[in-house]
């Protein structure tokens, strides 16, 4: 895992340029892992910078191990972004929406993705919102390389669920 004080963060990129700001955002995330609103920091800037309109960047891959580690270290309920963000980055990666994972980041990135079921398991006893349930399903799917299924789950809104449950395909 790329340490947060490693100078290589400034060599990595995100949607707005050099990723030297990402370690501070990850520190802030570790201090506030609970459920937040979609426009609350640091999630707003992390999503905007690292999974911008479905595109991902080298810094996205470096951030994922930290996000997963924070989720695993929390005894209290976490924000659904801890599961949805890694799932979204991995779906984008497999859809060609970003560069290849750099070799020096690949082992930690792959390990983090494989640990997503551990995150789900660690927080299974909590009350989950619909968003958290969708995020957990998507995280489980990407951890098992079912990226198309993860993407479909992430796109399920109330309208689609109703259509599926009622067999309304028109």
Image (tube, rainbow, N blue to C red):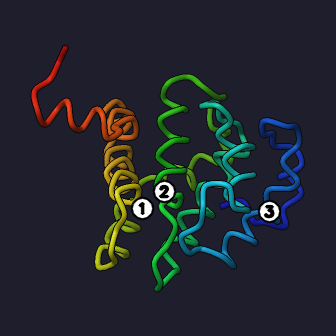
The residue carrying mark 2 is 111
Q: CA distance from mark 1 to mark 2?
A: 6 Å
Q: CA distance from mark 2 to mark 3?
A: 20 Å
- In the image, farthest residue toward the left: 167
- Residue drawn 35% across and 51% down? 134
- Residue drawn 53% across and 70% down? 35
Viewer-nearest residue: 37 or 138: 37
Residue 11, x across and y down, in percent: 87, 44
Viewer-nearest residue: 60 or 163: 163
Residue 77, x across and y down, in percent: 45, 78
Q: CA distance from mark 3 to mark 1?
A: 21 Å
Task: Left or right? Give the position of 128 relative to 103.
Answer: left
The residue carrying mark 3 is 23
Instruction: Find out whether the residues at labels 1 and 2 contact each other: C-beta distance under 8 Å.
Output: yes
Please say if 28 is above or below 43: below
Task: Left or right? Give the position of 68 relative to 23.
Answer: left
- In the image, farthest residue toward the top: 170
The residue carrying mark 1 is 115
Residue 14, x across and y down, in percent: 78, 40
């Amino acid at each position: 895992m790329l340490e947060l004080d490693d100078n290589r963060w400034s060599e990595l990129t995100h949607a707005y340029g050099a990723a030297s700001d990402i370690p501070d955002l990850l520190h802030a995330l570790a201090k506030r892992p609970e459920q937040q609103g979609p426009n609350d920091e640091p999630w707003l800037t992390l999503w905007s910078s690292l999974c911008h309109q479905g595109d991902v960047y080298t810094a996205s891959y470096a951030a994922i191990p930290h996000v997963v580690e924070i989720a695993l270290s929390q005894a209290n309920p976490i924000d659904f972004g801890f599961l949805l963000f890694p799932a979204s980055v991995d779906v984008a990666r497999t859809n060609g929406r970003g560069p290849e994972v750099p070799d020096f980041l690949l082992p930690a990135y792959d390990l983090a993705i494989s640990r997503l079921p551990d995150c789900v398991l660690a927080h299974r006893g909590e009350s989950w919102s619909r968003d958290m349930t969708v995020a957990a399903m998507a995280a489980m799917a990407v951890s098992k390389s079912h990226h198309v299924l993860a993407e479909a789950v992430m796109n399920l809104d109330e309208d689609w669920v109703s259509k599926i449950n009622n067999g309304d395909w028109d």
